[in-house]
Structure formats: C-alpha cells, structure tokens
Amino acid sequence: MKTRRLTMAQALILYLSHQYTERDGQEQPFFAGCWGIFGHGNVAGIGQALQQYADLLRYYQARNEQAMVHTSVAFARMKNRLQTFACTTSIGPGATNMITGAAVATINRVPVLLLPGDIFAERRQAPVLQQLEADYSQDISVNDCFKPVSRYWDRINRPEQIITALPEALRVLTSPAQTGAVTLALPQDVQTMAYDYPEAMFEKRVWRVPRNRPDAASLIQAAEWIKASKKPLIVAGGGVIYSESADALRQFVARTGIPVGETMAGKGSLSYDNPLNLGAIGVTGTLGANLMAHDADLVIGIGTRYSDFTTASKTAFQSPNVRFININVTEFDAHKHSAIALVGDARATLEELILALEGWQTDASYQAQAKRFNQQWDAEVERIYNLEHGPLMSQGEVIGVVNRLSKSDDVMLNAAGSMPGDLHKLWRTRNTKGYHLEYGNSTMGYEIPGGIGVKMADPSREVYVLIGDGSYLMMPSEITTAVQEGIKLILVLVDNHGFASIGGLSKAVGSDGFGTKYRYRSEDGQLDGEVLPIDFAANAASLGAQVIKASNRDELANAILRAQEMTTTVCIVVETDRRQRVGGYESWWDVAIAEVSDNPAVQQARQEFEAAKTKERHFF
C-alpha cells in the first residue's frame, strides 16, 4: 500500500481539502477554508500545516474565537449546509471561547468543524499552561466541555486515529439529519507527530446529500388527513430553506389553498405578498397567523422543530381535535406532537403530496379569510413603518427604511434583542435568503461575524446587519476582520441605551426594567443615573469602518443610499426610542414569574401568568 509520511496536522488539512458535497448534480468543495487564532496549542501543528497547504485550504484570521464559529455558521446556512469552514484554536480560553459557537451550530443544525488544540497526550509535562487538573482523571481537559454541544466529539491521542475519526466527522457534518458542530480535540504534541498515512486517504471524496423520501403508507395516511381537514395550516420552518423547496411549497399552497405561517428560520419560504402567506407565527407572530393557528384542525409542519416561540409555549394550537403532520429529515422532529411522521426531504415529500392531493382544495371562504389577513397585516406593517414617532425614531420605522431601500436580493441579518421579534413581524421578505435570523440560540454578538459569513457565501448581495447596542458591544472586533478581508457590510446600529428587549420583558414581569439600561451608578447605589456617553460612531471608526450618523428617517434614508455606493464596511448609527414597541398580536411566551413578591407589579404579573398558563397543552 502506497503511503505518505506526514504529521497528523498535515494529514488532516490535506484530507479536508479533498472533501466535496453533491446534491442534485451540483458539486462543491465542502470546506471553504479554515479560520484560526494561533497559540502554543496549535501554532506548530495545525498552523504549520495550514501554511504548508495554503494553496489547498485558505487560512482566515479572526479577532475572536467565538466570532469565527459564528462566521462559519452563517456561511454554511447561506450555502444550505452544503459548504462550511473549519475553525482552529489553541487549548485554554481560545478553545472555550468556541463553545458558544458550537452551541449555535448544533442548536440550529448547521455544520461546522472545530479543531481546538489540547494538552499533551504524552502527559510527562503536566500540569502545563492552561491545563484543567482533575483529581479523578488525567484524561480530561477544557475540551470536554464541547461534548454536550457537539454532534460528534473525539480526542486524537495517536496520529493514526484520524484515519478512522475523519470519515465519521464528515459523515455527521454532511448529514441533513445529524449535522451540527463536530469537535476533534487535538493534543499539541500529537499534531506534530509523523505517520505513514495511506495515499488513498487523500483522494477526492464526494459526499452525496440525499433527498430521502418518506414511507409510502405514511404519505397515503397524511393525504387522507389533509383531505379530511377543514382548517389546515402549514408551519414553514428552516427545513424549507435548507432543502431548497420554496418553489415546491409555493406550488403546494397554490394547488391546495392551505395558508402558511413562517417560523424565524422559515421566514422567506414564501414571498411576503403571496396571498396565502400569513407571515410570522407564534410569540413574534402576526395577528392572522396566530388566529388561524388557534382554530387549525390540522397543522402541517415542514422542517420545523416546534420551538416555544413557534408554538407560543404550547398555547398556539387550541382546537381540541387538532392533529399534526410533520415533514422533516430528522426522525426526532418528525414525531413531535404525536404527528404522522413523514421522515424525508421537504422538496421530495411535497412533490409526492402534490400528486396525492390532486384536485383537492380548502374551502373558498377559508382561503378568502387567509387572504384578508395577509392584506390587513400588510396595512399594519405600513402603519408601523410610518409612525412619525418623534423626536426619536421607533425601531419599526428604522426597519421600514432599511426594508424599502434594500434590493429584492439583499440580505438582512440579526440575532438578538428586541429586533428579532420586530423583524419577524415587519420585514417584507422577497427572496428565500433575504432574512437571516440566528434565533435557535439568539446569540448576542453573532451579527457582525455572521454578516461576514453571509457576504463570503454570496458576495453579489448587499448584506444589512441590523444590530442593537447591546449586541454590538459584545463583539465589535470583527469589523476589523471585515475590513482586512475587503468584505463590505452595511451595519445599522440601533442605539437605545441598553438591553431594550429584556428591559421590556422585565417590565412585563413586574421588575420595571431592572439592570437593563446603560446608566451611571447613582448615590443610592443603583444603576439609575445619567445615560452613559458611549460614542458608537467613534468606536466603529476606530476599527476601520466608515461611519454615518442619522437622527431621523430622512437622514437614515440618505445614509443608506450613501452606504450602498461605498465599497467598504459602513456603520450607520441611529438613536431610537426604546419605549415605542410593536404589539404582541394574540401571542404569549412562558417566562416564569416569581410566585411571591413584595412588589405589587410582580404580584399582578404572576396572576396574569397563572391565567395564561392554563392554555398550555400536551400533545399525546
């Protein structure tokens, strides 16, 4: 057998550079490169290998280890999980900084390969710098923290172990049902050890991403349930986008007349002006979607995992006889709510259901009701876009200006704060990739590195990163990464002087916004003094961004038009009134409230909570 003598790190990088994915005849390299920050735990191994094979796998430099995972997740999501990045760090804080990113990837079911350095396998040097010592085992390091947030985890204690570990890692990464973060912990000494690797290991390998079809008997039963329903409703989740089944969904809706509510990950499954698109559903949903969900006798979930935001904490579907059909590549999700489980690819399954339902449609009056809700919601969005709230703008007005001036193929990105809820309701989606919300983990700080990943995935699109001041302060450093790589983002930084989302929630639970405002500590010891004079414009400029300030809608519109003409990252800073909020529209979210309190507002909130809690349901 022909072999090649390489270090373990060299063999790993060479292997990654020869991995491809294919779906529907379209083939692409699976790894678009490797992000990394070097320390003593990876500089001599992975670092040397990346330098040696720079022409095969490009190295990218980040400023924060968590950020480079966010960038990889956003890139992979934009590529419908058919491409991703590897990320390497040293052992210690470099490795543990990636744990949040790993959680983002796994919760959102998006592939990313993590390659943290690890302590010496040899052990003679122990305890070494950054080693976590335990008195019950020597086979432990901080990298064990990755286990619960990884879909596959391994520690490579001998150089030949990667021969069997890497195919398993790729199997999981390329699986639509199992994908998420994959972690290979790499002891720093093992990275540099040489081994005679089989030459066949470095041949091109193509991982076919299948379009699996559901069980035939289950499909027949599902068609029977649909034909027997009077008020069916589709819940379109992220699986619609990942499987590239938006056209199939549009045809299915047109032929059957079943209206659609969209989850955070599924928003954009239909264009906002499709007459049967009810828009957002659940806690951050529209009035029409939530009213029709309340009365639905059949819910068809497509690529959704039924998070509490989608189901309004199990209060959304109130019909006593409601039944569920779930289309999902993951058996775990397909069986939720005691559904008929159509375990398979969304596009393939919808195509078969269209044939099985030939000639059947919902009642004309039911379709007319959905269409009225669509029109009424569009009018409500227009009202919020034009509030003329002043002197400070409302957040809804900011969203309206950006939405109107962006092009139909552009991308809006956000992750945390009060913005996701407002965007879910108000953003008028015009393409399947135009709405990018990381709301599985709702990670503060995801926005700027996420914007980099989206732009790298499709440089032809303008990327608008809408970000609150709280999220911005979590990770502004990646502005420098965007500038270094010549990546243009349009950042719209909303300054509302603190954590507006949790401030509103705090008020709702009776706590009056405690600990959520950016203010000086006053003489009484509380954080209720003057507003902190944070100069976000100066901060963004110091990191390399072009900066524009806007104080009203006209100035914001002019700033966006100017930003569109620029070729580098731009940060538009706009102050808003955090007190002006978008309504709840017949939805509820289960946030536990103190059962006893001296505060009358908390007591009242607890009474309302207990009344709402009675509407929560089990689905057997």
Image (cartoon, rainbow, N blue to C red):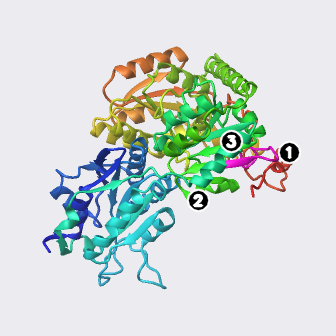
Of the image marks 2 and 1, the number of the one nearer the N terminus: 2
Q: Mark 3 points at which residue?
A: 226
Residue 316 located within the stretch drawn in magenta: yes
- Kindly report the distance in space between the C-alpha atoms of the residues bearing marks 1 and 3: 43 Å
Q: Quadrant of residue 281?
A: top right
Q: What secondary structure is found at the residue carrying circle 2?
A: helix
The x, y position of residue 603, in whole percent, is 85, 48
The amino acid sitting under disc 3 is: Ile
Judge whether 531 appears above or below 62 on screen: above
Q: Which mark is residue 467?
A: none
Residue at image x 56%, y 55%? 215
The x, y position of residue 377, in whole percent, is 67, 24
Q: Residues within 10 Å of mark 2 (few under 14, many from 20)?
A: few
User: On the rendered image, what quadrant is the C terminus found in?
Assistant: bottom right
Residue at image x 47%, y 59%? 178
Q: Nearer the viewer, residue 386 or 63?
A: 386
Q: Nearer the viewer, residue 340 or 429?
A: 340
- Kindly report the distance in space between the C-alpha atoms of the residues bearing marks 2 and 1: 39 Å
Q: Quadrant of residue 153?
A: bottom left
The amino acid sitting under disc 1 is: Gln
Can residue 342 be seen here? The reply is no
Q: Name the residue under label 2.
A: 332
> Seen in the image, is 64 located left or right of residue 501?
left
> Seen in the image, is 233 located left or right of residue 47?
right
Q: Mark 1 points at which residue?
A: 604
Question: Which region of the structure is painted magenta?
Answer: 310-325
